[in-house]
Image (spheres, helix red, strand yellow):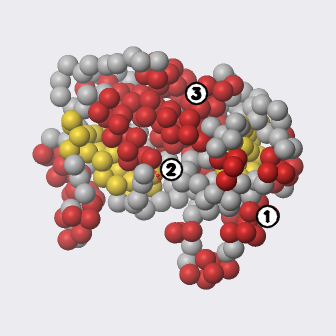
Amino acid sequence: FKDFVSAEQVDEKSALALINRAEDFKAGQTVHFPEPIYAANLFFENSTRTHTSFEMAERKLGLTVIPFDPAHSSVSKGETLEDTIKTIGAIGVNIAVMRHSKDGYYKELTGAWPTTAIVNAGDGAGQHPSQMMLDLMTIHEEFGHFDGLNIGIVGDLSHSRVARSDMQMLHKLGATLHFAGPQQWYDPSFDRYGDFISVPDLVKQVDVLMLLRVQLERFNADNREAFSKESYHAKYGITDALAKTMKPNAIFMHPAPVNRDVELASDLVDGPRSRIFTQMQNGVFMRMAMLEAVINARHFGEE
Ligand code: CP
């Protein structure tokens, strides 16, 4: 992985290798790179988990983290993203972890500076590969395999880069996928990965129930006014009553932040089926594995 930007790059073998490596890190393994590596985190969209988790992963790997504040950067004076990468590359940054609202922003940036890797921390409604990888790790930790697992993804599918990345990868790994939620948030192009069914039908048959955040910030003013949290929860959310119809060993996942009592009842977020905070813990170790793979490919000639 000379850059790590989308699910398309990841095949079954490399996904399993990254999961194993992340599990090693979780078990306490450490790594020492023989030369200094510099990372910068360029978050042009808000983030709590991904930003903090990447920085924790970088520090645990012994990288030097160079601060970058988009609001006070020269992007606010009109400098392009490409010139920004060239600039931090010229200054000596080896890894640029970036989140930006523009779908596919990374296509113009990989290779912009020959010694600077791009790691995508989320592009618009495009891809979120580190969330995808930590989701895979969390499912693998629970069930030990993907083949034949029934996985449901519910909610705001069309706005979700998490859904896009996860459905591509889980389908590749042999999981059976089901989708549910408001019809207007379903894109028929998802048919190639799974079927669209009702929320109650989905809930009772899945091993993994992934909820997606309703992304109010991506709605326009008219949509937002028409949207009621209570009616969403009643029609498409996971209520306590609906949760009782789940298979005995089924788990909840959610990329977070969670709109409590919208996507799922608040007590279920903290309940025994929830792996939402495990996902966040695993994110640090998976991001260590991803960054290590990029560093090895760039600096030490490993693929
Ligand atoms: N899951 C996720 O991407 O969370 P943040 O937006 O807080 O990074």
Q: Secondary structure at mark 1?
A: helix
- Element on which disc 3 rests: helix
What is the x, y in percent for residue 301?
29, 22
Residue of label 1:
234
Q: Residues within 10 Å of mark 3 (few under 14, many from 20)?
A: few
Q: Which residue is mark 2?
A: 127
Disc on the earlier residue, 2 or 1: 2
Question: Residue, x 59% and y 42% (percent of image)?
Answer: 276
Amino acid bearing label 1: Ala
Mark 2 crowd level (few <14, some 14–19, many ≥20, 10 Å Cα): many
Q: CA distance from mark 3 to mark 2?
A: 18 Å
Report how many numbered discs are placed on residues in the image.
Answer: 3
**Quadrant in which the C terminus appears:** top left
Q: Which residue does the numbered mark 3 point to in the structure image?
A: 12
Residue 183 shown left or right of residue 223 in the figure: right
Residue 258 at what x, y percent from top left? 59, 54
Q: Amino acid at mark 2?
A: Gln
| CB contact under 8 Å: marks 2 and 1 | no
Residue 149 visible at all: yes
Please state if 221 lies on the left or on the right of 67 as rendered: right
Query: Which numbered disc, 3 or 1, marks the residue that appears first in the sequence?
Result: 3
Q: Position of residue 293 (x, y in %)?
A: 38, 27
